[in-house]
Structures are given as structure tokens and as C-alpha cells.
Amino acid sequence: MVAAARPVADVGNTGSSLEDWFKSLPIITRYWFAATFFFTAGMSFGIIDPINYIFDYRAVKNGFEIWRLVTPFCILGKFSFPTAISMYMMVQYSKRHEMSPYNTGGGSGTADYATTIIFGMALMLVVSVSVYPMVVMCQHLVYMTLYLWSKRDATQDVSIYGFPVKAVQLPFAYLGITVVMGNDPMPIIVGIVAGHLYYFLVEVIPAMYGRDVIHTPGFLVDFFGPGQYAPAVQAAAAGGGGWQAPGRVNPPAQPTATGGSRGFSWGNRGGQRLGSS
């Protein structure tokens, strides 16, 4: 297992305690990390038998064990140094990309990141059934997220084993080190391929052909709201009653509806974080 790269400038607030740090994580990253930690702890203490949660197409098809479509993306193994590194990478790169994902209709926010994760999970499940069998895919999804973040923040300075590299070079640096160390490179390869396919669909095709391929479903925009997710807050504080919907505390000015399930169009194809200049 390779060491996680250290960014020159970190993103987000780690808070003054473990609870503050956990609550500071974006919503999808927070629950992905929590689920992974749950499985890691359960497997380490013998409470959870991973055989009941790994991907098994026959169990899904014949036994309707549909949880196996999700749980393989939360299994890294028992507590160990490589597992800790993988969880660190999950938090760091998922957090960075969730804070400013590709804008596919949700204002470069949480709904768009949820679309990215769902796309990656579905693609890897299809690949597992038809091309390359995989029973756990958490690392694969982490590397997909890393690849997409590296494309979004290509010029950011990071370091790996003390060597400075640009963010866009980071996935391939991980791949090279993994091969040299004699570890299995397939999780990184699958993650890079899945990430590049998503990047091609949301950036290259629209730029070359003027046609959008991936759209954030309307129900995700309705649930998370446009832009970054914000928990529901009691409207009474502002002199009203009831609750405000998630994600609509600080909506962008004059969002333009695109109709149907495509969510919202925010002008700049790459999207901006709410409140950014």
C-alpha cells in the first residue's frame, strides 16, 4: 500500500475535537467514511462476516440481497496500516471533490457528487459481472474520486513520499509506486479508468459536440438542494414557521431551470462553489 499524498494547502476545518472534525466533513464523505469504519471495526472484532456483504451477483439475483450492491463499496478489511491509509485517502479526496464536483445540473454541489458516486458504483458493478470479477470495490471508488479531483484541481501542489507533484500526476504516481512495491494495481487502474470515463462524458463530449450526456437526476437536486448540501434549519429563527429544505439556505441568485429531471443550469459548465468568486 502506498502512502497518502500530503497537500501543500489543506481544505476544510478539522475542528477542535473528533466530533467537530466528523461533523465538518461533507455529507456524503461523512457517511461513506462512517459506513467503512463500521465494517472495518465489525470485521476486526469478529462481529461482521464480510462474506455476507461482498458483491455476489447470484445472491443479488436469486436471493434479492440488494444490500450487496452498496456494501462492497464500504469494505476495506480489518484494522491495519494499509486500511488506515485507504480511509485517510477516502476522507481527503472525497471531501475535496465533494466540495466542488463537476456541475451536471446541481450547481457543482452535493447532488452532482452523489451522481458521480452512483455512476462509479454502477459502472464497477457492471464490470464485475461482465469483465473483471470484483467482490469489494471501496478502494476502486476511492481512486476514481482521487482521479476526478486531480482533474478538477490539476495544478494544485501535493507531495508523495516527500516528492512534490502536481495533483494531475498523483493517480499515476500511486500506480507506479504500487507496481514497484509489488502490490495489486487493479484497484487503481479500475479507479482511473472509471474516473476518466466519467470525465470524458461530462467534460470532453459536451466541449466537442455540445451535447450533455450525464445529468443529475431531479430527485437528487430536490433532496440535497442546489450547490453544497446544508442541513434543514428551523425557519422560525428567520420569523417563519416549519423547516427549510436541505441545501436551500443560500441558493445562488437567479438559477435557471433546464426542465425535466436535469436539475439546474448554472452558466459555467465547470460550476462554482456557493459563495465563491
Image: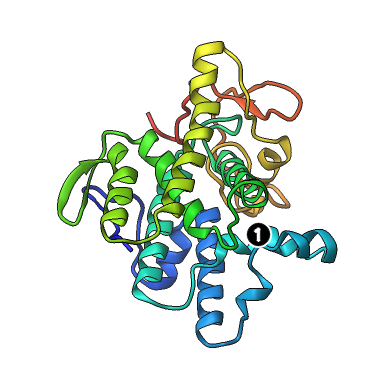
Expressed as whole percent of the image width and height from the top left, the position of residue 201 reads 55, 27
Residue occupying image coordinates x 44% and y 71%: 19
Mark 1, Cα crowd under 10 Å, few <14 / some 14-19 / many 20+, is some
Closer to the camera, 58 or 226? 58
Expressed as whole percent of the image width and height from the top left, the position of residue 3 reads 28, 61
Quadrant of image for the C terminus: top left
Residue occupying image coordinates x 51% and y 52%: 141
Expressed as whole percent of the image width and height from the top left, the position of residue 200 reads 50, 27
The residue carrying mark 1 is: 70
- Give the quadrant of residue 115: top right
Up the image or down, 108 lies above or below 160; here it is above
The image shows a total of numbered marks equal to: 1
- Give the quadrant of residue 50: bottom right
Up the image or down, 265 lies above or below 153; here it is above
Up the image or down, 276 lies above or below 55; here it is above
| Residue 116 can be seen in this image | yes
Horizontal placement of 2 versus 265: left or right? Answer: left
